[in-house]
Amino acid sequence: MAGNRHGQARESAAAFQANGRRRRSNHPGISQAPGTAPATTLWKAFPFREGNHRRGNLARRRRGGKLSGSVTEGETIVSGVRAGDTPLDDGDRPVSDATTTIDNDEGEAPAIQTLPLDAWHRARGGRMVEFAGYHMPVQFEGIMAEHLWTRESAGLFDVSHMGQLTFTGDGVVAALEALLPADIAGLPMERARYSLLLDDRGGILDDLMLTRQADDRVYMVVNGATKYDDIAHMLDSLPDDVTLNLMEDHALLAVQGPKAVAALARVVPGVEALVFMQARGFAWQGHDLWISRSGYTGEDGCEISVPADAVEALADALLAQPEVKPIGLGARDSLRLEAGLPLYGHDLDTDTTPVMADLGFALSKRRREAGDYPGAARIAAERENGAIQKRVGLLVEGRQPVREGATVVDADGSTVGRVTSGGFAPSVGAPIAMAYVPVAMAAPGTSVQLVQRGKVHAATVAPMPFVPHRYFRGVK
């Protein structure tokens, strides 16, 4: 679920002090409201320190919204991973989301952060790479093997780099509906929903999951590489009565695969009663867990929010189940690609709309009819008249994967589209890709040509997902 906007939306303390205001991003679609604010306020909100990489207290109001907790600033460019390959082995662009580094006053990149399970991963042979500003495991025993194990059994993923947020206070539902096209008011308690953070042009700032925990409380998970910019964007609009909390004292695990819930149920009894996109609080060894039946692989499974000081014990308990193995970022990427799930910063960005991205299901009926969400006019026009381009799946002929950055060309050789994700699909046994193409070329079965490094590859537009989703929606 990270593009270039996050690096552009943040500035050093020196820049804040010099300008005395929040400087505006040059990236299209970023909220660029004028006005001044004390540099110290913004510095506290996004703490920079000269020559170091430190934390700062965020219990601070910023133009209305209140943020509690702390934020660590600075993220770095990611190492690429591909199914069956090693990171950055031949100069290809990464298939994982990249972030932009911010240099400090001495020209040094901020330190890469570590997650609570860093030592746990290394002890189990995890090959660590930089991802979304953190050291994270790209693989353990091999991307291909981990991919197939998850499809057949159960994989344990550490996704603690993601941003876990809570929003509390009177009017929290209305405040969030002003930013998202989701029908949060109509969302039952303990139900999760996929949604999109949109700019005023209808461009996608991030994709996210939210859950209604109470009348005055919403839990949200945003992408790790965009979380600080998401926070800044939302704080610009949240009213005084709503508090945003960044849950830095929590980790996030995902256990995915057809045997995942059965394995988890032996550790945390009761989770088997959940259905897809349902969430609930559980107690485990004196710790409060928040578990949702959801994931990013197309398989059945759960995501588990757990206190950071308990995550190693929980990971050990899960790994003790015979169905479960640790899985790295490489297999996570190939699994989501087969499932037809977009990755922010690659398949989604501020230059794409929900209609272009084929994410119309994230626009709830009530909100579409009211037209009261950011970018509603443009999105309504695209729904009625069609967008210029559309995200599609591609089956690539031969065995050579076509990567992000390849171009889609027409019969005359003119560039008409772009590949945004691509790789070898272990469950399909062939290369697949996602691309944006003109609507006239988006019908399944359409033959297209892709150009990568001067070589032409034949491909066919295919329906997504490439592998059927196996979400558990209840007993029929």
Image (tube, helix red, strand yellow):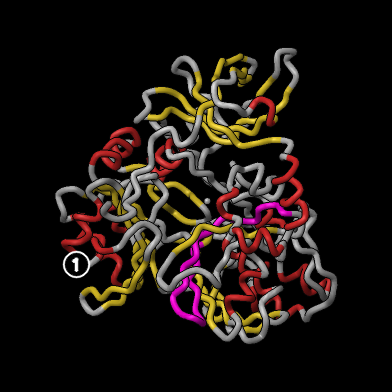
Relative placement, left or right, of 152 versus 128 is left
Q: Name the foreground residue: 63 vs 46.
A: 63
Relative placement, left or right, of 24 versus 66 is right
Residue 220 highlighted magenta (yes or no): yes
Query: Is residue 131 among what the camera can see?
Result: yes
Q: Position of residue 288 (x, y in %)?
A: 31, 76
Q: Name the foreground residue: 152 vs 162.
A: 152
Can you say whether 101 is above or below 451 in the image? Answer: below
Q: Looking at the picture, which amino acid does disc 1 mark?
A: Pro
Q: Position of residue 41 (x, y in %)?
A: 71, 81
Q: Which residue is mark 1?
A: 269
Relative placement, left or right, of 188 versus 56 is left
Residue 283 highlighted magenta (yes or no): no
Residue at figure coordinates x 70%, y 82% from the top left: 64
Can you say whether 411 is above or below 193 in the image? Answer: above
Q: Residues within 10 Å of mark 1 (few under 14, many from 20)?
A: some
Q: Name the foreground residue: 289 vs 463.
A: 463
Give the number of marks.
1
Q: Position of residue 90 (x, y in %)?
A: 51, 27
Residue at figure coordinates x 54%, y 21% from the top left: 445
As helix, strand or loop, the secondary structure at mark 1 comes to loop
Can you say whether 280 is above or below 362 in the image? Answer: below
Which secondary structure is most common in the magenta stretch? Answer: strand
Can you say whether 53 is above or below 340 in the image? Answer: below
Query: Is residue 316 among what the camera can see?
Result: no
Q: Name the foreground residue: 121 vs 293.
A: 293
Residue at figure coordinates x 55%, y 72% from the top left: 185
Q: Which residues are magenta?
A: 202-221
Instruction: Examine the image and state in which quarter residue 197 appears.
Output: bottom right
Residue at figure coordinates x 64%, y 34% from the top left: 436
Instruction: Examine the image and state in which quarter residue 176 appears.
Output: bottom right
